[in-house]
């Protein structure tokens, strides 16, 4: 093999390696919100000792008490009826009267960047006929004021509960509009809320709670979530990127590998 051919093969191999690494770096891996392997209690920014998830965001509820079973690695939420009425009506205009809710934040400051992710996902066991509405709540760009919630989506849109374990996948695209018809700002997400769990007395058993990244073309392991920091000052944004960029890089990688194979074949034949 000539020195020119050796150089060509080496350059093709280096290019392929670089393209693969770049594709992997520019996509967001899945992030575990909670594995429920323990009941974590922390003094939160609200000054309360509350259960928190693996990202440091606390859980809360009214009329939807929850219990973590570390042995089973589950959280059980029990639907009840509370005298809530319509809390913060300016944030949820046109919605039905609230009789219970459960929520969790994705970091302690309640101003999380969901834009690198494609879905919220968890496993759920719920009885036949059970339902409830999911929504994302909104913070302002400076992370200080609550704004209008995203549209509400019912559990029954995604699964039909039947008492068995089912995987619930909530595409974030389904929450891209707020209740006033405007765009929901995923970059400044306050929390993930489940409203009006029903019927009263029903138990919803959650496990394997995660944020789904956008690495559909590249194998990904659990990554580290990013936050917006206190009062809107950008902090650590984690590993970010877009699906289109990753897909384009994968296509380039395949082309590079094809070129490398062609060079190798030429060498063996000559």
Image (tube, rainbow, N blue to C red):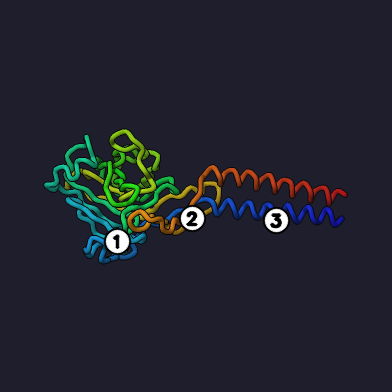
Image coordinates of residue 185 in percent, x first then y, are 36, 43
Drawn side of residue 79 relative to residue 107, left or right: left
Image coordinates of residue 139 in percent, x first then y, are 31, 48
Q: Name the residue under label 3.
A: 14
- Numbered disc 3: secondary structure: helix
Q: Residue at the spot x=57%, y=44% of the render? A: 247
- Say if 147 sits above or below 65 in the image: above
Q: Mark 2 points at which residue?
A: 239
Q: Residue at the spot x=36%, y=50% of the render? A: 122
Q: Which is nearer the eye, 117 or 45?
A: 45
Is residue 179 visible to the viewer in this orientation of the structure?
A: yes
Q: Residue at the spot x=52%, y=44% of the render? A: 243
Image coordinates of residue 186 in percent, x first then y, are 38, 45
- The answer for how far apart the CA atoms under marks 2 and 1 are is 23 Å
Image coordinates of residue 123 in percent, x first then y, are 35, 50
Which label is found at residue 52? 1
- Numbered disc 1: secondary structure: loop
Image quarter in which the N terminus is found: bottom right
| Crowd band around label 1 with a 10 angstrom C-alpha radius: few (<14), some (14–19), many (20+) | many
- Numbered disc 2: secondary structure: loop
- The answer for how far apart the CA atoms under marks 2 and 3 are is 23 Å
């Amino acid at each position: 093999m000539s020195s020119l051919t050796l150089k060509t093969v080496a350059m093709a191999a280096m290019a392929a390696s670089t393209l693969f690494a770049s594709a992997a770096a520019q996509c967001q891996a899945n992030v575990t919100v909670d594995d429920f392997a323990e009941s974590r209690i922390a003094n939160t920014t609200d000054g309360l000792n509350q259960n928190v998830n693996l990202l440091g965001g606390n859980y809360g509820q009214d009329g939807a008490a929850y219990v973590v079973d570390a042995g089973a690695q589950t959280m059980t939420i029990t639907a009840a009826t509370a005298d809530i009425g319509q809390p913060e009506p300016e944030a949820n205009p046109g919605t039905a009267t609230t009789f219970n809710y459960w929520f969790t934040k994705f970091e302690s400051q309640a101003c999380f960047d969901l834009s690198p992710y494609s879905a919220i996902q968890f496993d759920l066991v719920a009885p036949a006929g059970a339902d409830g509405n999911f929504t994302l709540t909104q913070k302002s760009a400076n992370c200080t004021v609550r704004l209008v919630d995203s549209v509400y989506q019912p559990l029954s849109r995604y699964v039909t509960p039947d008492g068995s374990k089912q995987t619930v996948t909530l595409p974030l695209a389904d929450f891209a509009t707020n209740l006033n018809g405007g765009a929901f700002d995923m970059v400044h997400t306050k929390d993930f809320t489940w409203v009006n769990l029903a019927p009263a007395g029903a138990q919803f058993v959650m496990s394997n709670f995660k944020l789904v990244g956008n690495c559909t073309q590249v194998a990904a392991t659990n990554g580290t979530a990013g936050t917006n920091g206190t009062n809107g000052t950008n902090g650590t944004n984690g590993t970010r990127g877009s699906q289109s960029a990753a897909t384009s890089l994968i296509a380039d990688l395949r082309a590079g590998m094809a070129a490398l194979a062609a060079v190798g074949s030429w060498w063996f034949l000559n």
